[in-house]
């Protein structure tokens, strides 16, 4: 998970990340909010194994399942 110091869209600092989340994933703090690419930026700059697969999920959009 990538967390910038300040949200560019809202111009506010992000709150501290709860312990139950930090136990589940690695938090990469960055200085600049790059917009939508920020969500994977931390993984791209911190991962060194070229065989790693990075999967990104976004909770901003709800997709309806049509069957």
Image (spheres, grey):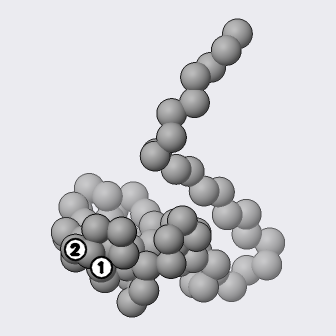
Quadrant of residue 56 within the rendered picture:
bottom right
Q: Is residue 49 left or right of residue 29?
A: right
Quarter placement of the C terminus: top right
Q: Is residue 49 left or right of residue 65?
A: right
Query: Looking at this view, is 33 or 41 the one in front?
Result: 33
- Other residues around mark 1 within 10 Å, as few (<14) / some (14–19) / many (≥20): some
Dot 2 or dot 1: first in sequence order is 1
State the separation of the CA atoms marked 2 and 1.
Answer: 5 Å
Q: Where is residue 12 shown, x and y percent of the image? A: 22, 74
Quadrant of residue 55 within the rendered picture:
bottom right
Query: Looking at this view, is 32 or 23 the one in front?
Result: 32
Residue plotted at (39% across, 58% down): 24
Taking the view exactly as shown, the residue that stands out farthest to the bottom is 31
Q: Where is residue 37 shown, x and y percent of the image? A: 58, 70
- The residue indicated by pointer 1 is 6
- The residue indicated by pointer 2 is 12
Q: Secondary structure at mark 1?
A: strand
Q: Where is residue 25 shown, x and y percent of the image? A: 43, 63
* Image label count: 2
Quarter placement of the N terminus: bottom left
Quadrant of residue 6 within the rendered picture:
bottom left
- Other residues around mark 2 within 10 Å, as few (<14) / some (14–19) / many (≥20): few
Vertical comparison of 17 with 61: above or below: below
Contact check, label 2 and label 1, Cβ < 8 Å? yes
- Check residue 28 in the rendering and tell me which mark sits there, or answer none: none
Q: Secondary structure at mark 2?
A: strand
Residue plotted at (26% across, 56% down): 20
Taking the view exactly as shown, the residue that stands out farthest to the top is 67
């Amino acid at each position: 998970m990538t967390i910038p110091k300040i949200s560019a869209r809202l111009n506010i600092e992000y709150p501290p990340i709860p312990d139950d989340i930090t136990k589940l994933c690695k938090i990469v703090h960055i200085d600049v909010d790059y917009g939508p690419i920020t969500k994977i930026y931390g993984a791209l700059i911190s991962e060194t194994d070229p065989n790693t697969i990075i999967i990104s999920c976004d909770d901003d959009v709800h997709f309806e399942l049509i069957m």
